[in-house]
Image (spheres, helix red, strand yellow):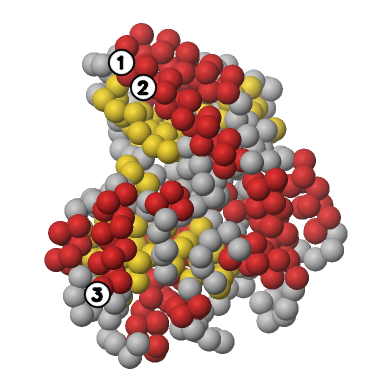
Amino acid sequence: MKEHDNATQNQEKGLLCSTYSRYPLEIARGRGSKLYDPQGVEYTDLLAGIAVCGLGHCHPEISAVIKEQSDTLVHCSNLFYQRPQLDLAKALTGSCSLDRVFFCNSGAEANEAALKIARRYMQTIRGLKAHEIVSLEGSFHGRTLATLTLTGQDKVKEGYAPLPPGFKTVPFADIEAVEAALGDKTAAVLVEIIQGEGGVRCLPREFLHELQDLCRSRGCLFMVDEVQTGLGRTGKLWAHQHFDLRPDVLTTAKGLANGLPLGAMLVTEEVGQAFGPGSHATTFGGGPLVCAVGTRVLEIIERDGLCRRAAEIGKETQKGLQELKARFPGKIREVRGKGLMQGIELTFPAKGVWQGLLEKGFICNVVQDRILRILPPLIISREEMTDFIDSLEDVLYRQ
Ligand SMILES: Cc1ncc(COP(=O)(O)O)c(C=O)c1O
């Protein structure tokens, strides 16, 4: 890492709300799996905008579709029919067992839509007063008032009381706790198949099936938040497909338009009946530009076999990291994840290791203090992952 000209850093102080702990790095340009600072120093991006740029930065076919669609139609209100939205809805519903789509702009908004449709489905279709949504400790579902209430981490709730009622959080992967939390008032349970911000924690297959069965038998909706795990990240297009689950509701965002803001909530035909004209809406969600990009993203993932690639490179990476763990048993506690969503839990705060990696030109991040998280673009090469593991080894020697 080079000494930086701090002009941008200094100028934004006092200008922006300081909601982010910035990395000591200004990014000027990106290409594939590489990011460059204004001086042209190159970094290997093992974070992909936090699971956003799955196809890498400035993918030429994505740039081309942005150019083409921006010369045709960028925005038109959801009052009108338009082809790009229809094409993406077809591609999304064709990719899983769900039938209908509501488009929005972000993961939090997709989850808001899920919360709203769960309540409305119970109240208008089933004629029940059920409204409560159950989530798991450690989960992350967004920063709107409802989604942060649902999030199973206290730190995001500080200073925002009173929080809206109607949400319950239960211990991670504890089916008895879920069972005890479900009652007449429960509308839905929402889970991440692998908790991302919570520290790359994978829900066990058995728990997921018991949870789905429990939701079915108690008559509440089984909803999956695939905002981080979706679009090939874990080695299947959707993480729930590793376990042959059939959720009633799925939310996605992040990787959907490779960096443009686009989110979606997918529902079964039956649940979809709960939304009619005027029951939910957005100005920007599902605009022609972002939808044209989303459709191309799905085509490229399919055409280039990126799910299989994520599964294979992820497996090799995990093997390499497990070997590292064997060499540093006192420093690495656990390596976990699926595909190109991997967490390396250290026995000590990870900031020094993160910094050492940044100095060697690798961008990753730290979650829950001790966990290094990597979410590289799906186009990352084997060599880049090997270089990362070698660099991590180097950094760990010095810690
Ligand atoms: C699992 C999950 N759900 C929801 C969100 C919120 O998405 P957004 O930041 O696009 O609102 C995130 C963001 O990190 C996430 O990881």
Residue visible at 77% across and 41% down?
60
Q: Nearer the viewer, residue 143 or 159?
A: 143
Question: SS of the residue at dot 2?
Answer: helix
- Against 270, residue 113 (above or below) is above
- Is 283 on the left or on the right of 80, as rendered? left
Residue at numbered disc 3: 218
Query: Gap between marks 2 and 3, in whole Å?
Result: 40 Å
Any part of residue 387 in sight: yes
- Is 304 on the left or on the right of 241, as rendered? right
| Label 3 packing within 10 angstroms: few (<14), some (14-19), many (20+) | some
- As drawn, the label of residue 322 is 2
Any part of residue 152 in sight: no
Residue at numbered disc 1: 326
Q: Nearer the viewer, residue 274 or 261?
A: 274
Question: SS of the residue at dot 1?
Answer: helix
Q: Position of residue 137 (x, y in %)?
A: 25, 52
Residue visible at 23% across and 50% down?
172
Residue 26 falls in image quadrant: top right
Q: Position of residue 240 (x, y in %)?
A: 43, 54
Contact between labelled residues 2 and 1, with CB atoms less than 8 Å apart: yes
- Against 38, residue 170 (above or below) is below
Residue lying farthest to the front in this orientation:
244
Disc on the earlier residue, 2 or 3? 3
